[in-house]
Image (spheres, rainbow, N blue to C red):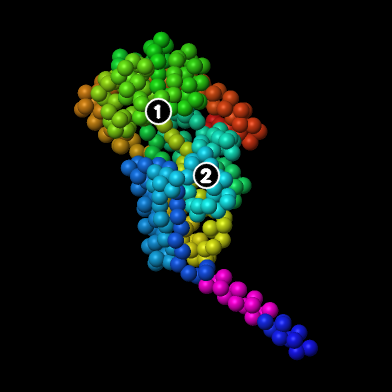
Amino acid sequence: MQSTIKSRLLGALTILATVFTLQTALAAPQTLKMHSGIAQSRPEAAYLDQFAKLIEEKSNGDLKLEVYHSGSLGLKEADLLRTMQRGLIDMAMLYGEYYNRDAPELTAVYAQGAITRAEQHLEVLPTLRSLYENSFSKWGIRSVGGVVAPVFNVGLHCKEPINTLDGLKGKKVRVWSAQLVDTFAKLGISAQVIPQNDMYLALQTGVVDCAYYLSTVAKTVSLQEITKYEAYLHPWAAAPWIFGISERSWSRLSESQQRVLQEAGEEIWGGSRDKSVDPAREAAATAERQALGITVLEPFPQADVERFVAAAQLAWRELAERAGEAGLHNYKVVTQQLSH
């Protein structure tokens, strides 16, 4: 009898000790490690650093975030969903188009040529975010805000004055994705994917005649040295970056730490969203390029823009179909909203 009482007492004490240990662990200061595959010089990286600062400030040092820029942890983007599912890293800056092997439906959420007005991007952002968050949750990843990339002007940067789709026929155009290759092909225009780091040499040596590129930041890759003419085609809007935390890491945080993480993430999301569309920024960038000697031609005619968008959406749909039922669903959800 006494042994039974002692056994039960010991068991109760063990449970209390375990609960106390768990509560102590949850209440203790925590440091999370976060992977980022982008270079620290990019604007998005500055938002990440701001995110880490906000977390420490809002938690009074109870929660800290160590950001590892430029993939310095040695993680591969293609493996990131699996890595986080296993809890091998606490947090990561997630970009849906990188995970074609494991989640092909994510590559069909958004595409170049999806919008013709910068404001459309802001209208569709909640839908994009919801689609990404739902997919990430299936991998045991909780979303806590993110970064909305700036909406930049996209133009054709050519060695000759070209500002029509017909003028591009017979020319070779540099692009950055297979979807864009398909888009231009549907318009009878030859395009090929050339990495940004190789673009200057490709233009210099005649491998391509024009570059489809972000006009706002063209100066950063010295396009003005080899392409003297530029014509605006459409606004560029990237898929948003999502801040993801492994559910395993999330469960280790106290309720107050979880709340801080969510608040900081939402603050970064809202701040970057509010700055993403900025006509004054685009106008200043155009004036700067003109001062560098670029001849800024009249924009592509509206009829050409409509043809480009139609071709882009057809290429987008084909991409979605290859991604399967989930990819086609994502495509339909986004395009239906954009059509309203």
Q: Secondary structure at mark 2?
A: helix
Q: Residue at x 40, y 18 (%)?
A: 173
Q: Is residue 158 above or below residue 274?
A: above
What x and y, as percent, mark residue 300? 38, 19
Q: Residue at x 24, y 31 (%)?
A: 288
Residue lying at the far top of the rendered structure: 170
Residue lying at the far front of the rendered structure: 3
Does 45 lie within the magenta span?
no
Q: Nearer the viewer, residue 286 or 160?
A: 160
Occupied quadrant, residue 194? top left
Judged by its main secondary structure, the magenta piece is helix
Q: Residue 80 shows which numbered tag? A: 2
What x and y, as percent, mark residue 83? 54, 47
Q: Residue at x 56, y 61 (%)?
A: 251
In this picture, residue 224 sits left or right of residue 120: left
What x and y, as percent, mark residue 78? 52, 39
- The residue pinned by badge 1 equals 195
Q: Residue at x 37, y 29 (%)?
A: 196
Query: Is residue 161 among the parts visible in the rendering?
Result: no
- Bounds of the magenta segment: 11-24
Q: Residue 203 shows which numbered tag? A: none
What x and y, as percent, mark residue 228? 27, 20
